[in-house]
Amino acid sequence: MSAAPPRSPGASGAARGDTLHAGAWWLWALGLAAAASRTTNPLLLGLLVATAGYVVAVRRTDAPWARSYLVFLKLGLFVVAVRVLFAILLGSPIPGSQTLFTLPEVPLPEWARGVRVGGRVTAEGIVFACYDGCKLAALLACVGAANSLASPARLLKSLPGALYEVGVAVVVATTFAPNLVADVQRLRAARRLRGRPDRGLRALSGIGVPVLEGALERSVALAASMDARGYGRTARVPAPVRHATTALSLGGLLGVCAGSYALLSAQGTALALPLLLAGLGAALGGLRLGGRRSVRSRYRPDRWGPRAWLVSGCGAVVAPLVLLCTPEAALHPSVVPLVAPSLPLTTALVVLLALLPAFLTSAPPRGPDASSPPPTDEQPAFRPHHLRPSHTTAPQHFNRSAPLRFHPSSLSEDVQ
């Protein structure tokens, strides 16, 4: 049997170079979410969701956290249904003249004036509730796209040292939904194999209890792993450096808040941009000094390359271009009177810019172990020498009384 071919020294580096930075996917998704938050047009919101869904379909991996986009879509549909149900039962602030049906109204005491249960249900109120629910559903879809495309562990590895502890808490919180989805899918598949129902109320108790048990076991294992790796331990930093870090961080945050408020207000716009830039500079200086307290090291950090700039830029330009190219009547269709929503061609072309990451990035590896192909004759699997099949024509008899001997030389041959 021939020896395994040596792995190229640059193979791992090339694989890392083909991997896009996790922060780029989050910036791209946040750009789509910013555009969705500025409109109630269902056509525009549907185009944003479809764009995010296409990129997720062609660029997500087979990891468990990459299967959460469909769950976020179902959660968005549930939000729309709940919003419409509340509008039917509790009424809508939008006055309407086209009555669909009338529910029995429950009389309420005097102190509950302004709140009603039941009564007249109008078409304008239902349409307004649908528009509002669609906006929330689109925001959830954008967050789900970021969860499906960006690896939480790689995103944590890219954070500055000063934000590492906070980043761990955020990553643990954001990975709760993908891990929950993976557990539910695994338990449903196990119940189907055993001939038991995996849908409906009968399957809820059989799936819910193991999911909660798995979440508790995962939490205990995570706590033990964090303690064993020294989570929370910091290096000794002189007192003046700590005080300077605190002053720069707080001052920078105050400057960013004041500059952002001045930009949005009608007064104080002359000082808004300098104040915002000064706040950002102070905050970055505080993060740089705060990173000295972190004693951890980074192994093979992800690089922010040209493709990361292109992907994040494709999402960042969508929101401002949509606001510039779309008239107000198309951003917020009228419900009193009812008007059919329209989508300008220029706005649609601007949103389609967010599809470029599907063509600018490389396809991710597929399969359970795509990074290491299965062994072949040219690349044998690792097996001890005494367990390999014999290549002689005559059969060999195994002597049970003879001791098994393992030679280190065979291990070195297999490793090579």
Image (tube, helix red, strand yellow):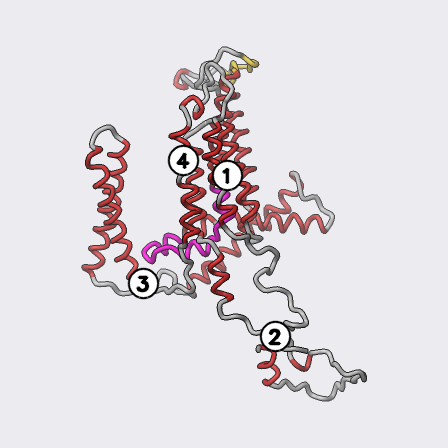
Query: Which tag is nearer the camera, tag 1 or tag 3?
Result: 1
Residue identified by numbered label 3? 234
Residue 391: x %, y % from top left: 74, 81
Question: On the rendered structure, is 97 left or right of 303?
Answer: right
Characterize the magenta stretch by its predominant secondary structure: helix
Separation of disc 2 and disc 4 at Cα? 52 Å
| Type of amino acid under label 2 | Ala
In magenta, the rendered stretch is: 143-168
Regarding mark 3 in the picture, which secondary structure is present there? Answer: loop
Question: Was residue 108 drawn as part of the magenta stretch in this picture?
Answer: no
Quadrant where the C terminus sits is bottom right
Residue 199: x %, y % from top left: 66, 41
Residues marked 1 and 4 touching at CB (< 8 Å): no
The quadrant where residue 204 appears: top right
Q: Is residue 283 above or below residue 13?
A: above
Furthest residue toward bottom: 402
Separation of disc 2 and disc 1 at Cα? 45 Å
Residue identified by numbered label 2? 4
Q: Earlier in the sequence, mark 1 or mark 3?
A: 1
Which one is nearer the viewer's eye here, 136 or 218?
136
| Type of amino acid under label 3 | Thr
Separation of disc 1 and disc 3 at Cα? 38 Å
Residue identified by numbered label 1? 141
Q: Earlier in the sequence, mark 2 or mark 4?
A: 2
Question: On the rendered structure, is 192 left or right of 249?
Answer: right
